[in-house]
Image (cartoon, helix red, strand yellow):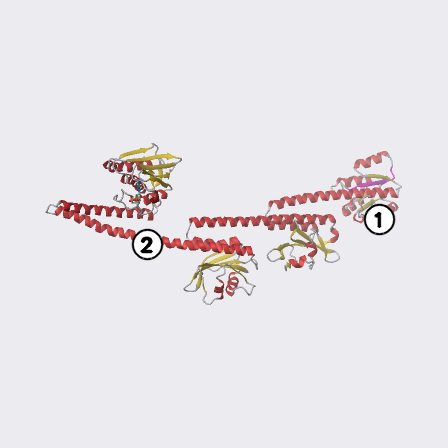
Amino acid sequence: MPQEIDKSKYTILIVDDDEDARLVLKMMVQRDGYQVFEAEDGLQALVRFDEVRPDVVLMDAMMPNMDGFTAAEKILEIPEGKDVPIVMVTALNDDASIQRAFQIGASDYITKPVQVSVMRHRIERLVRTRAAEEELRRIIQDQRFLSRLDRDLGYTLDRQRVLNLAMDVVLRRTGGSSVVVGLLNPSTRRLEKIASIGGSSILNTPIRESELLEGKHEYSPAFGQTGQVVKLTEDDDYIQLVIPLVVEANQEGIIIVDHVMERFLNDSDLQFLQQVGNRAAVTLDKARLYERSKAYNEKLDFLHHISTAISSSLNRADMVEMSTRGLPVLIEGTSAFYCAYDRRRQALEVEANFVVVGMSDKPPEIGTTFDMRNDDFMQYVQERVIPFRLSDPKSPARLRAFAETYGFKSGLVLPLVIEMNLFAIIVMGESRSDRVFSPDELALARSMGDHFTVMIQQSELFNEVKALEEVKSEMINMASHDLKNPLLQVKGYLDLLLKTLDVKLTEQQNEFVHRIQAGITRMNTLLEDILNLERIESHATTQLDNVNLRLTLYEVAEAQRYQAELKNQNFSIELDSTDAFLQGNEVQLQQAFTNFVNNAVKYTPEGGDVYVRSRLEDGEFHFEVQDSGFGIPKDRQDKLFERFYRARTPGTEDIPGTGLGLSLVKSVIERHGGGVWFRSEEGNGSTFGGWLPVDKTANGSSNG
Ligand code: ADP
């Protein structure tokens, strides 16, 4: 059984100069339900064809003005006519005429007198073919269109663009007057209008999700999970179409098209719209996932940022800034501000503020203060997180006032508390919606509050320690300078006294003088050491020399040779032959090398061995000083590089020193990007070594 077709949708043009013949044909096709138009000759046929665009033409051959063959030929030549079936209906039954008709492109040839049933079947067959062709063409066109839409949608992860594309397609296909997209907002649980074309007032007020799901709303049928387009009657001629946006049984929302002429719509249009809806929904879903993963990445970035910041910078201002930005990034708010709490004045003072790009919040200026005496908010601060909403009368009045003044609808406050003492609060605002924070979000906020508390406290402690260090440096500097002058005076006058003394000193007196002089020398070295260290540690190196490390070490070692020989030590310098250069402070490096070599000579008894070695390896300058001296017991090795630490082992008690040398070496070498190490065994000597990075571009031009 061939499929039923709606014949009223098809038009037939009957062309014949004989009025009776036209009438017969007309009655026949009209009875079958087709729409009929007539023309009296070839010329008129062309005009009518243009007007009505018939689906089938029944064409007589012999007519005045223009014959049927010529007219058929002309129709088939134009683009609109080339696919239209033309049936020649004629009394001519000679071979030549039949031949000519098919040559021109006629679809059929029927000789008069017409046999009604044959004629009806042939027309029906032509109409069917035409319908099938049309359907096929439309399917191909739709397919092409959808694949283009897929491609366009595939290119974009931008929600607005997806919606614009979908709305445009839907409007074109339906000829509606306006289109609106409504999406379900998961936090407000309402269907909200988020895009439209054509200025419709549909969805101007959001619809509650529950109303839609419980079948109480006219749009409820579109939420029945069938995914099918729903038609709603507007009046006799017009309807509204509701296209569901569904992804994997998850309804995102609907597209509503307004003022669509029902008779211009068929099943395939509805199918097409449904497909557009599906595709838009999938792409929206993708866009949402993308946005979520972007936000997630930002959060990860931020967390990473925090952890590096904690370990690298301990600058309080940085920490405050980071905490202020951190909250809106992590909880996805729109702004934040940080207030330090002054306990004495009982006031909050704004120290930092932040607004997410594109948001309209206006947090208070830095320096703004809030008097918190007798403020109801203070009773909440022992809670770790305080959510609030402008519209919720139960929220603390102070916070609702903040919301009103600074343009947010809701938000949360993190009180930063240490040992029951409030020291700051961070206020985060949300200006887009009257948002209710989820338990997860509140938990995250709470744990961020703990982090921020530790971070900020730590930086404050660090700053205090730094300030103390500065005071201490200054005091050491002052003290050593003040001690140096009188010491020089003592030395000067002692020398003078000895020179101008008339009497010869007894042996014992000479011994006293000798001890005084040794004491002065020792005090002088001590002061020098302290000053040296202070100078090096408290001032960053500004002057950079192109230091030839091998040469520097060599010169330093040679300068100590004399001391070693005084103690009958075997003193050996074994440096490899390649020069190594470094941009650094030459004086400091000299001092560092000197300390290593000097210690080895100092802490090795008469007749021992001292080796100074260096080599270039993997782009690093490695140096070491080995001795066969006293060595250091295991339990005294830990603190060796600390200031003022002296191991004081048997045999070394009388060796003069301050315990500052190694700490200076360490700080100088590390300042230059290198490191130090040592190994030592009590009674078996020690090796102290280190490495420094070598500058590959430098060469021997300056010091070499
Ligand atoms: P000092 O002025 O006491 O030499 P240093 O900081 O240079 O101060 O050294 C700290 C301590 O480390 C010394 O007091 C000494 O006990 C130990 N020490 C340093 N170098 C050596 C070494 N080559 N052999 C044995 N002990 C050493």
User: Residue 478 at what x, y percent from top left?
Assistant: 28, 52
Picture layout, residue 661 above or below residue 426 = above
Q: Earlier in the sequence, mark 1 or mark 2?
A: 1
The crowding category of the residue bearing disc 1, from other C-alpha atoms within 10 Å (few below 14, some 14 to 19, many at least 20), is some
The crowding category of the residue bearing disc 2, from other C-alpha atoms within 10 Å (few below 14, some 14 to 19, many at least 20), is few
How many numbered circles does the render carry?
2
Per the rendering, the mark at residue 72 is: none
Please tell me which residue is depicted at 36% across the width and 40% down the height of the picture: 677
Quarter of the picture holding the N terminus: top right
Residue 91 counted in the magenta span = yes
Ligand 1's quadrant = top left
Relative to 177, is 373 on the left or the right? left
Local SS, label 2: helix
Residue underneath mark 2: 471
Please tell me which residue is depicted at 31% across the width and 33% down the height of the picture: 574
Residue underneath mark 1: 30
Q: Which of 249 and 70 lies nearest the eye of the viewer?
A: 249
On the image, which quarter does residue 78 sit in? top right
User: Residue 34 at what x, y percent from top left?
Assistant: 82, 48
Judge whether residue 356 can be spotted in this image. no
What amino acid is at disc 1? Gln
What amino acid is at disc 2? Val
User: Residue 336 at what x, y percent from top left?
Assistant: 49, 57
Relative to 520, is 284 on the left or the right? right
Local SS, label 1: helix
Distance, label 1 to label 2, CA atoms, is 111 Å
Q: Which of 3 and 399 lies nearest the eye of the viewer?
A: 399
Quarter of the picture holding the C terminus: top left
- Residue range in magenta is 84-92
Q: Which of 126 and 291 lies nearest the eye of the viewer?
A: 291
Please tell me which residue is depicted at 48% across the width and 61% down the height of the picture: 382
Judge whether residue 109 can be spotted in this image. yes
